[in-house]
Image (cartoon, helix red, strand yellow):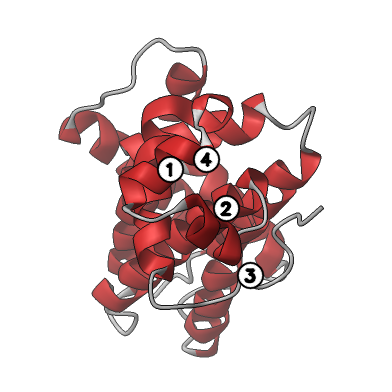
């Protein structure tokens, strides 16, 4: 069975099918989403849908990977990587937290966790298209900031994971345990500022 590691067949209605599937998965979850509903939402026949995606798991992973890649690319394009390091980290943290607390981010995370026992490849593929991609982008930035003597980091992979975890403080546990799924700008900025302050205290180069 396809597990999301192969590339899907592209065609004229590929994006149309992805968008329809995105809407249905968000509304009904992975288990509740039917191929009939997805085809209807996409405005295509089931035969057309299956010509692009052999099964629902493969379709779900392409939806998740496409959205995560889009979010990552948008974040990178909108951030001035040549700005002072504290400003860059602040902007990255804001982008990460906004995605994590978005309706899509929360829904995809819960679907992957909920289905991980039956379909462990879902969680693995989500990690590779989401958290791992963020980690790799952070490592790239740390290398550039280190070359400019703005950051002093030996283990850049670990530092990227640490920054990611700092950005989840307070907010993520409350989401996971269903205490709340909405956060104010002030709540988000409290975590952003704390994450950047702690990270700079450990890795920032003193002027």
Q: Which mark is residue 153?
A: 3
Q: Residue furthest bottom?
A: 147
Query: Nearer the viewer's eye, disc 3 or disc 2?
Result: 2
Q: Is residue 180 visible?
A: yes
Q: Are marks 2 and 1 in contact (CB under 8 Å)?
A: yes
Q: Find numbered disc 2 in the image and state the secondary structure of the residue it sits on.
A: helix
Picture coordinates of residue 91, whole percent (x, y): 29, 61
Q: Are marks 1 and 4 in contact (CB under 8 Å)?
A: yes
From the viewer's perspective, is residue 205 above or below residue 191? below
Spatial CA span between label 1 and label 4: 5 Å
Residue 142 shown left or right of residue 4 in the figure: left
Q: Residue at x 25, y 26 (%)?
A: 183
Q: Which mark is residue 38?
A: 1
Spatial CA span between label 3 and label 1: 46 Å
From the viewer's perspective, is residue 88 above or below residue 55? below
Residue under label 2, please give it: 59
Name the one closer to the observer, 134 or 48. Answer: 48
Tell me where residue 143 sits by quadrant: bottom right
Query: Nearer the viewer's eye, disc 3 or disc 1?
Result: 1
């Amino acid at each position: 069975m396809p597990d999301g590691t192969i590339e899907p067949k592209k065609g004229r209605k590929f994006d149309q099918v992805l968008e329809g599937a995105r809407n249905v998965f968000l509304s009904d979850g992975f288990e509740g989403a039917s191929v009939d509903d997805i085809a209807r939402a996409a405005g295509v026949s089931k035969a057309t849908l299956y010509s692009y995606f052999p099964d629902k798991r493969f379709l779900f992973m392409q939806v998740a990977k496409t959205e995560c890649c889009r979010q990552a690319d948008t974040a990178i394009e909108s951030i001035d990587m040549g700005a002072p390091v504290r400003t860059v980290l602040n902007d990255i943290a804001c982008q990460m937290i906004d995605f994590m607390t978005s309706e899509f981010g929360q829904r995809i995370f819960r679907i992957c966790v909920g289905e991980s026992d039956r379909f462990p490849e879902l969680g693995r593929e989500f990690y590779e298209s989401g958290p791992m991609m963020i980690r790799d982008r952070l490592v790239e930035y740390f290398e550039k900031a280190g070359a400019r003597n703005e950051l002093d980091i030996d283990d850049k992979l670990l530092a990227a994971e640490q920054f990611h975890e700092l950005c989840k403080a307070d907010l993520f546990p409350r989401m996971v345990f269903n205490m709340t799924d909405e956060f104010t700008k002030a709540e988000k900025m409290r975590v952003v500022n704390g994450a950047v302050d702690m990270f700079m205290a450990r890795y920032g180069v003193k002027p």
